[in-house]
Image (cartoon, coloured by chain):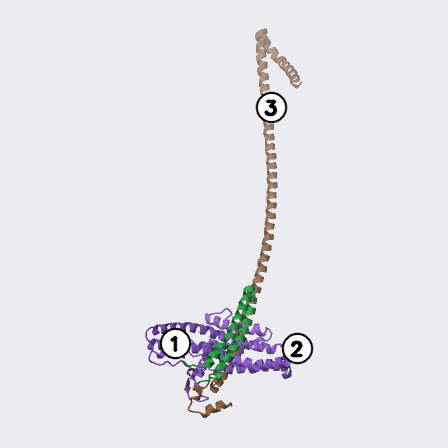
């Protein structure tokens, strides 16, 4: 077995943003289901929230590469 | 890696795709070598320029053909769906060219990742996302400083209604957001999505090939499954590529709108 | 220039960029990205967007013009409808008037005809009456002569042959018949 602990660490770190992205879109779907006419207004906000939540996963991704220990 | 150990059972050892696979120099090998993504970038520029110039040469009031309709739909999407909705109907027109440029450039370069003869997303080399982000980063700070003055701009970074004892902490966080987190995430989001997606497809296709050629027993069947899954993931990647182009311009528009807004 | 770039530049035989972390930007690619972004931006901002904006503006105007044209057509249609309705009302009135006129004319014609017929009838009656009178007078005259002759014949047969001449000469019979007539007339008048 090869590989690095960083990858496992990144996998763990991605759990949080994954849940966050799920929550963002759950709220978006809820909102649109309740008020379909608000779709146009909610969509950019949902994508924005998704991007912000995803940013954490991306920081983890970068950190996983910045220190690829155990080469 | 588990996949490589699995395949080693077949005799040949499997080289899993690595970040080094993305380094494809054509001429030279140093810091200023001509690399494949550079050529792709130039190709995307030529394609976009040719398509845009050709389709907008004679614009009719009623769209004459599908190409004109498609280009206008794309432009209308960036202009109305992103710029006007986010920046506001007063000043959005000035920023439409930049947003449209960014959108088309990122879109074409991303989609290169799944187009068969190319199959290399330019944005998986971080230099390109950083170049785009650098422009956006400089632009939204300059707009803010021009609008509110340098002092006023730094004052405006502070959100209103924060208790006095929290002001230093919140201000530091805001500075971090504006000067580090925003550009970093903007560039790395694009890069990471393209890089990881392309790596995933590489693993599926190269691994499938290895299983098919060197696997024993039922392993070639697993190779076929791997190929099929790679195909599915290619379509998923297409979705991600379009979405990332949209997110990039959406965030750019949001940052510009934030710099133009009066209060934080 | 950051240290890693210098290191890479110094290390000419390569290897560095192949082994470098993927989050390190390759300077050449960074510059290429900036250059092509700038080129495309110039192209889009100077040529493509003005063209598209112009087309959008023209389309907006065309649509607005179309709306105005449609409104004008609507107004015209409304005016035509009003005019048509007015004309219809006029025509209806005209028809009523004509009908009334015709009825009056018909009545007048009927009255005239009746009058004419009556006059004709009157005339025919009068002429018939005159004819009858004339015939009656003629018949009476003939009758008188006949009756006179018959009476004289009768009397001469009774009285004798000689009476014939002197009776005729004296006009006795005539006188007698005239008396008879007047008395008869008096009886019928009563």
The green one among the chains is: A
Residue C71: percent from left, percent from top: 58, 62
| Mark 2 neighbour density, 10 Å: few (under 14) some (14–19) many (20 or more) | few
Image: B167 above or below A33: below
Which chain does the numbered disc 3 sit on? C
Contact check, label 2 and label 3, Cβ < 8 Å: no
Q: Quadrant of residue C176?
A: top right
Image: A69 above or below C99: below
Q: Which residue is mark 1?
A: B205
* Viewer-side residue, B137 vs C189: B137
Residue B32: percent from left, percent from top: 46, 88
**In terms of secondary structure, where does tag 1 sit?**
helix
Which chain does the numbered disc 2 sit on? B
Residues at marks 1 and 3, CA–CA distance in whole angstroms: 144 Å
Residues at marks 2 and 3, CA–CA distance in whole angstroms: 145 Å
Chain B as rendered: colour: purple
| Mark 1 neighbour density, 10 Å: few (under 14) some (14–19) many (20 or more) | many
Q: Which residue is mark 2?
A: B163
Contact check, label 2 and label 1, Cβ < 8 Å: no
Residues at marks 2 and 1, CA–CA distance in whole angstroms: 56 Å
- Nearer the observer: mark 1 or 3; the answer is 1
Which chain does the numbered disc 1 sit on? B
The brown one among the chains is: C
* Viewer-side residue, C128 vs B178: B178
Contact check, label 1 and label 3, Cβ < 8 Å: no
Q: Quadrant of the C terminus of chain C?
A: top right
């Amino acid at each position: 077995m090869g590989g690095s602990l960083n990858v496992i660490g990144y996998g763990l770190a991605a759990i949080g943003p994954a849940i966050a992205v799920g929550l963002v879109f759950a709220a978006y779907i809820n909102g649109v289901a309740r008020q379909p006419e608000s779709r146009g207004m909610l969509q950019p906000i949902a994508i924005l929230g998704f991007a912000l939540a995803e940013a954490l996963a991306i920081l983890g991704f970068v950190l996983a590469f910045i220190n690829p220990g155990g080469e | 890696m588990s996949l490589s150990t699995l395949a080693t059972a077949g005799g040949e050892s499997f080289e899993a795709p690595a970040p080094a696979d993305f380094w494809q120099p054509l001429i030279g090998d140093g810091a200023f070598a001509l690399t494949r993504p550079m050529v792709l970038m130039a190709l995307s520029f030529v394609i976009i320029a040719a398509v845009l110039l050709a389709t907008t040469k004679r614009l009719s009031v009623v769209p004459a053909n599908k190409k004109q309709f498609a280009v206008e739909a794309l432009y209308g999407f960036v202009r109305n769906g992103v710029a006007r909705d986010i920046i506001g109907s007063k000043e959005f027109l000035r920023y439409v060219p930049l947003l449209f440029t960014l959108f088309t450039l990122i879109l074409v370069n991303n989609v290169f990742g799944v187009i068969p003869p190319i199959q290399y997303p330019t944005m998986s080399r971080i230099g390109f996302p950083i170049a785009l982000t650098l422009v956006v980063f400089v632009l939204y700070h300059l707009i803010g400083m021009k609008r509110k003055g340098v002092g006023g701009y730094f004052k405006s970074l502070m959100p209103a209604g924060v208790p006095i004892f929290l002001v230093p902490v919140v201000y530091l966080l805001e500075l971090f957001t504006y000067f580090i987190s925003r550009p970093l995430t903007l560039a790395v989001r694009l890069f990471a999505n393209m890089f990881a997606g392309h790596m995933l497809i590489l693993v599926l296709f190269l691994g499938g090939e290895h299983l098919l050629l060197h696997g024993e027993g039922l392993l070639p069947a697993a190779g076929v499954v791997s190929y099929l899954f790679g195909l599915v993931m290619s379509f998923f990647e297409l979705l991600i590529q379009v979405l990332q182009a949209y997110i990039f311009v959406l965030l750019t528009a949001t940052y510009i709108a934030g710099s133009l807004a009066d209060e934080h | 220039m950051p240290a890693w770039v210098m290191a890479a530049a110094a290390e000419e035989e390569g290897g560095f960029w192949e082994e470098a972390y993927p989050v390190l930007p390759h300077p050449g690619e960074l510059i290429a990205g900036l250059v092509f972004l700038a080129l495309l931006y110039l192209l889009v901002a100077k040529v493509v967007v003005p063209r598209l904006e112009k087309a959008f503006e023209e389309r907006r105007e065309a649509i607005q013009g179309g709306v105005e044209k449609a409104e004008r057509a609507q107004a015209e249609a409304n005016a035509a409808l009003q005019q048509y309705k007015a004309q219809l009302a006029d025509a209806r009135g005209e028809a009523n008037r004509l009908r009334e006129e015709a009825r009056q004319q018909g009545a007048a014609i009927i009255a005239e005809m009746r009058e004419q017929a009556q006059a004709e009838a009157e005339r025919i009656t009068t002429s018939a009456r005159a004819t009858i009178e004339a015939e009656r007078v003629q018949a009476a005259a003939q009758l008188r002569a006949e009756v006179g002759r018959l009476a004289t014949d009768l009397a001469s047969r009774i009285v004798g042959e000689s009476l014939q001449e002197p009776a005729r000469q004296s006009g006795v019979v005539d006188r007698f018949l005239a008396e008879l007539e007047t008395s008869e007339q008096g009886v019928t008048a009563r």
